[in-house]
Amino acid sequence: RDEDTKPLYKIEEVVNDMVSMDRVAKSVRIWSFEKDGNNKGPRCDDSSVVISVGTSLRVMCQEFMFTDRRDEPFFPPEAGDVIQPFTVVELMLGASNKEAFSKGYAIKVDRVRLSPFSLYSLHTPLGLGLLPQGYQERPARVQQ
């Protein structure tokens, strides 16, 4: 990547885990980009979105997501046909081009992986502290 190219991702907010003393990202900003043929062109500074811990995403599933398209399938094969409710998953998110961004598709989900830990392991002071603390805070995060 060219050194003069602006990054498409930036960690916005970091918090300290008081148990492990690790620094943990609480939110990340993702910018869209101009298309340059089949490559990513320059970053669009006027179109970005912030994804925070606790953000809900709605993803439209399409047929190609269920077929092998790269080295790894989109959905984890060990999940079987159904990912059970309350299963913790890791999402690999990608920036979308400016055209898709203008249609409301700010990010794309590139891959889904089952997490090695359970939902109950998030019940720590840090894990619970990262989530919205009440109903009133949720709409504010969605509007960002």
Image (tube, helix red, strand yellow):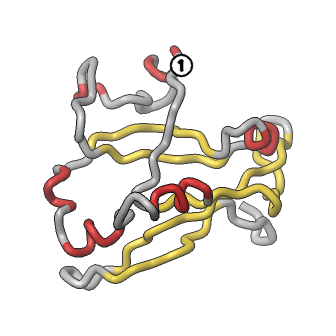
Q: Nearer the viewer, residue 76 or 19?
A: 19
Residue 106 figure quarter: top right
Classify mark 1: helix, strand or loop: loop
The foreground one among 85 and 34 is 85
Q: Residue at x 52, y 56 (%)?
A: 139
Q: Nearer the viewer, residue 130 or 107?
A: 130
How far across and down, in percent of the image, does residue 84 sit?
Answer: 22, 30
Q: Position of residue 28 (x, y in %)?
A: 54, 64
Left or right for 73, reference 93: left
Please tell me which residue lies in front, 40 or 55. Answer: 55
Whole-percent x, y for residue 132 in the image: 38, 63
Quarter of the image containing the N terminus? Answer: bottom right
Residue type, label 1: Gln
In this rendering, would 6 be left or right of 144? right
Give the quadrant of the C terminus.
bottom right
Answer above or below: position of 138 versus 16: above
Q: How many marks?
A: 1
Find residue 26 and report its image quarter.
bottom left
Q: Quadrant of residue 74?
A: top left
Residue furthest toward the front?
136
The residue shown at (14%, 55%) is 120
Q: Is residue 110 above or below residue 51?
A: above
Which residue position holds label 1?
Answer: 62
User: What's the residue at 48%, 61% (across, down)?
Assistant: 52
Residue beneath the point at 77% across and 64% down? 2
In this view, the residue farthest toward the top is 63
Q: In the rendered image of this protein, does residue 11 appear above or below residue 141?
A: below
Q: How many residues crowd mark 1 within 10 Å: few (<14), some (14–19), many (20+)? A: few
